[in-house]
Image (tube, grey):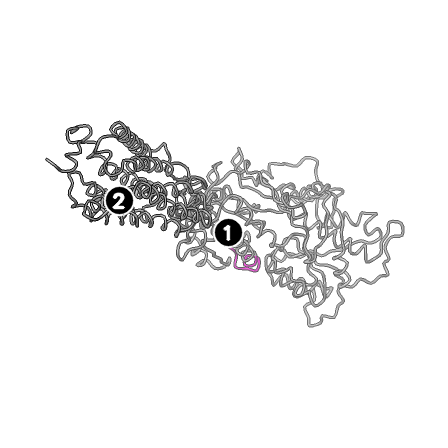
């Protein structure tokens, strides 16, 4: 303070013909002493002890106090008189209220910035589970309140919040016990250095070490905390400190003052009135071996320097000073004018730092991040490892050199302080009941859901055609399922299809070779060959059901199946009618065969088949089958199937086949006892019985069987019914043709012996 005032008084530019005076009071840490000093300053006579308070104040500004609580009392006292108070270290955000403290200024930033950047520091290192201890004062309570609000916004959880006063040892012991039992490894200590010293003593006494302390400017660089045992508790601490002083000339000034003070001497001649001797050229420096103060370690001195210069520049403006004409000393300066003038000051001090007051009366927030480290000689150093500068653009305000930090216990590995370990991708967080949001369990995502980030609050569903992978951290395309030719089941079905075609062709060849024999000519050989042709088509139509469904294959498979089977049943129906007509025609007076000769048989087969063709054409025209991705039946895969389009069309086709089959069965059943050694009606009855049984069983199985097995069931029904007709109708005839040719005579066929 004295250095700044003397520097200003010597200046020819700032207040050229005006000298600044000062009075310095030591309040000894007592608010009462501060009040006594302020009253003396305002009354112009510090020795006044009577009741009179009539003196006009000659004070234009008060520099102080150091602590926020004392500054609040000071500002409230001077507030009615509008005397500006400029503090160098009072940081309580409560002092930013211009309605309550309209004449308060400070050469340090408000705790609003420090508290918020404390949260940024904690979050930067991934510490989401911290403890909080603060002084039970304006400074501690306001700073901690801002920190807690910011921590909640940023997702940082506070396990406990404790506070105590310096004169409350029982509360201090409670705080120590809470810290000892806590699981949080990081402690944010928003305290004045006195309270921090009290806490440090108890933590050292109870051997509570290994905690990562996060400090504030009030104590993080306090030399009073550096003791032989303190480093075991505070080693590795991180915190924000006021930047070091770097003012040219200050070191020489303080060195001179220090020299004269320590050796009780004064430069120049002997002063008989004060009794001080002149300083020698060579003093015994061993007397100073325990002196460890250094000008380069001073931090708050720069704030005092800026406060003095702010007052000087405000006076310079009010007195309308100029370098050529000096200042107008006739101008009467009032306190409220000084307040308004301080709001407008904007200057740059010798080290290049720009100084101005914002709307709350504070300067720009500028902090140095320091780390408690032990030097090679065992001494404790407050090593700078970063900075915070609110004047810089976003992204550059807060810078940390993480690699330069030494953590508690001398470790170089970052300590961990979380309530719950991070949830890996593929899981989601579920809060633990009755605990903060940072305490949670990691639950795997459900099937079909994923989380691809760490600590995900929820899982998101995969798109319709995607499914979660095994780790539940990515969506992958669902497997598309259809009955392909490469599958074992498909190969088996193809084998039986080809085998059925080959058998049918063998039977047809056998019948062609023996076309003139009685057993082949019986019951219309033309219908037999047409039946064998339709059976070949029935076997082959099953192949249309295998393979990837497409628009054409979906339309072909159902229509081909419907038409070929109607052709087959029509042929059997024609043969059944021929049998019945043949035996009815043998009765006297009846000639029924002329009404159902070969031409009528061909027409009946054509007519029955044509009806099915019309049904299929209507189905394909109105609402045809189409390929469809079924994602509802199975969650983890897509069934590629042929949707029916019109269910009515499908069941009409199937129903028409069933109607012909039932009609054929009934007629064959009626002719089963007709006399003949080879009554084909019996064979048709068995074949239709198998056919109906297969397709009646098919319906519930088809409806209930999922995916590609639905297609397999339909193919099985086609093959089973085709094999049933082939074996029941043609196997006995082939047996006679190949193995019992002696029975292949007209005489035997007529049942004559």
Q: Which quadrant of the figure contains the C terminus?
A: top left
Apparent side of residue 583 relative to residue 213 in the rendered image (left or right): left
| Residue 329 placement (x, y as % from top left) | 85, 58
Of the image marks 1 and 2, the number of the one nearer the N terminus: 1
Residue 564 visible somewhere in the drawing: yes
Please, what secondary structure does the residue beneath circle 1 have?
Answer: loop
Mark 1 and mark 2: Cα distance apart in space: 96 Å
Q: Element under label 2?
A: helix
| Residue 382 vs residue 604, the one in the foreground | 604
Whether residue 172 sits left or right of residue 697 in the image: it is right
Residue 206: x percent and y percent? 41, 48
Please state if 483 lies on the left or on the right of 303 as rendered. left
Which residue is denoted by mark 1 in the rendering?
155
441 or 488: nearer the viewer:
488
Residue picked out by circle 2: 593
The magenta segment is 132-142
Residue at point 44%, 49% (across, down)? 618
User: How many residues crowd mark 2 within 10 Å: few (<14), some (14–19), many (20+)?
Assistant: some
């Amino acid at each position: 303070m004295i250095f700044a005032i003397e520097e200003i008084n010597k200046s020819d530019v700032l207040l050229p013909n005006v000298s600044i005076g000062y009075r310095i009071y030591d309040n000894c840490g007592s608010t009462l002493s501060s009040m006594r000093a302020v009253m003396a300053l305002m009354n112009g006579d510090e020795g006044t002890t009577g009741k009179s308070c009539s003196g006009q104040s000659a004070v234009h500004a008060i520099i102080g106090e150091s602590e926020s609580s004392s500054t609040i009392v000071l500002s409230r006292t001077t507030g009615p008189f509008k005397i500006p108070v400029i503090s160098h270290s009072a940081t309580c955000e409560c002092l930013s209220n211009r309605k309550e403290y309209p004449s308060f200024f400070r050469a340090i930033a408000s705790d609003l910035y420090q508290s918020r950047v404390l949260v940024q520091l904690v979050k930067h290192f991934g510490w989401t589970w911290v403890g909080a201890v603060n002084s039970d004062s304006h400074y501690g309570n306001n700073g901690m309140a801002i920190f807690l609000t910011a921590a909640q916004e940023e997702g940082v959880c506070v396990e406990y919040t404790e506070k105590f006063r310096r004169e409350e040892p029982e509360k201090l012991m409670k705080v120590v016990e809470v810290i000892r039992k806590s699981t949080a490894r990081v402690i944010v200590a928003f305290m004045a250095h006195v309270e921090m010293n009290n806490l440090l003593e108890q933590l050292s006494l109870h051997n509570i070490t290994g905690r990562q302390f996060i400090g504030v400017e009030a104590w993080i660089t306090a030399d009073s905390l550096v003791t032989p045992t303190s480093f075991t508790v505070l080693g590795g601490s991180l915190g924000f400190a006021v930047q070091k002083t770097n003012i040219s000339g200050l070191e020489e000034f303080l060195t001179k003052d220090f020299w004269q003070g320590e050796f009780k001497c004064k430069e120049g001649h002997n002063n008989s009135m004060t009794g001080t001797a002149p300083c020698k050229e060579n003093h015994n420096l061993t007397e100073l071996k325990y002196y460890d103060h250094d000008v380069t370690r001073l931090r708050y001195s720069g704030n005092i320097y800026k406060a003095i210069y702010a007052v000087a520049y405000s006076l310079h403006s009010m007195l309308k000073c100029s370098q050529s004409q000096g200042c107008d000393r006739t101008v009467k300066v009032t306190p409220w004018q000084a307040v308004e003038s301080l709001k407008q000051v904007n200057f740059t001090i010798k080290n290049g730092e720009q100084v101005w007051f914002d709307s709350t009366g504070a300067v720009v927030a500028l902090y140095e991040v320091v780390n408690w480290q032990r030097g090679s000689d065992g001494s404790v150093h407050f090593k700078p490892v970063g900075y915070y500068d609110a004047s810089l653009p976003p992204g550059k305000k807060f810078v940390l050199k993480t690699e330069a930090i030494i953590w508690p216990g001398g470790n170089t590995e970052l300590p961990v302080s979380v309530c719950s370990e991070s949830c890996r991708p593929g899981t989601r967080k579920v809060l633990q009941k009755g605990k903060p949001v940072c305490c949670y369990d990691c639950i795997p995502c459900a099937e079909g859901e994923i989380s691809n980030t760490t600590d995900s609050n929820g899982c998101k569903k995969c798109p319709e055609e995607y499914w979660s992978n095994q780790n539940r951290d990515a969506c992958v395309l669902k497997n598309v399922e259809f009955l392909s030719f490469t599958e074992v089941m498909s190969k088996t079905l193809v084998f039986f299809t080809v085998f059925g075609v080959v058998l049918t062709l063998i039977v047809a060849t056998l019948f062609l070779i023996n076309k003139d024999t009685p057993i082949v000519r019986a019951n219309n050989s033309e219908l037999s060959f047409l039946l064998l042709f339709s059976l070949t088509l029935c076997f082959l139509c099953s192949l249309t059901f295998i393979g990837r469904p497409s628009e054409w294959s979906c339309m072909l498979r159902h229509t081909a199946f419907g038409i070929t089977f109607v052709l087959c049943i029509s042929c059997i129906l024609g043969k059944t009618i021929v049998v019945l007509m043949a035996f009815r025609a043998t009765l006297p007076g009846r000639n029924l065969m002329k009404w159902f000769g070969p031409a009528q048989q061909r027409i009946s087969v054509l007519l029955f088949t044509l009806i099915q063709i019309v049904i299929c054409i209507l189905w394909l025209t109105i609402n045809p089958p189409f390929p469809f991705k079924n994602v509802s039946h199975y969650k983890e895969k897509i069934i590629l199937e042929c949707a029916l389009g019109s269910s009515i069309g499908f069941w009409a086709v199937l129903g028409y086949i069933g109607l012909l089959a039932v009609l054929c069965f009934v007629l064959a059943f009626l002719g089963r006892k007709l006399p003949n050694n080879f009554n084909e009606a019996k064979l048709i009855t068995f074949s239709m019985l198998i056919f109906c049984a297969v397709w009646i069983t098919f319906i519930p199985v088809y409806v209930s069987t999922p995916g590609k097995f639905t297609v397999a069931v339909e193919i099985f029904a086609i093959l089973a019914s085709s094999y049933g007709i082939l074996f029941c109708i043609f196997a006995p005839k082939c047996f006679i043709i190949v193995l019992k040719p002696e029975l292949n005579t007209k005489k035997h066929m007529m049942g004559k012996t």
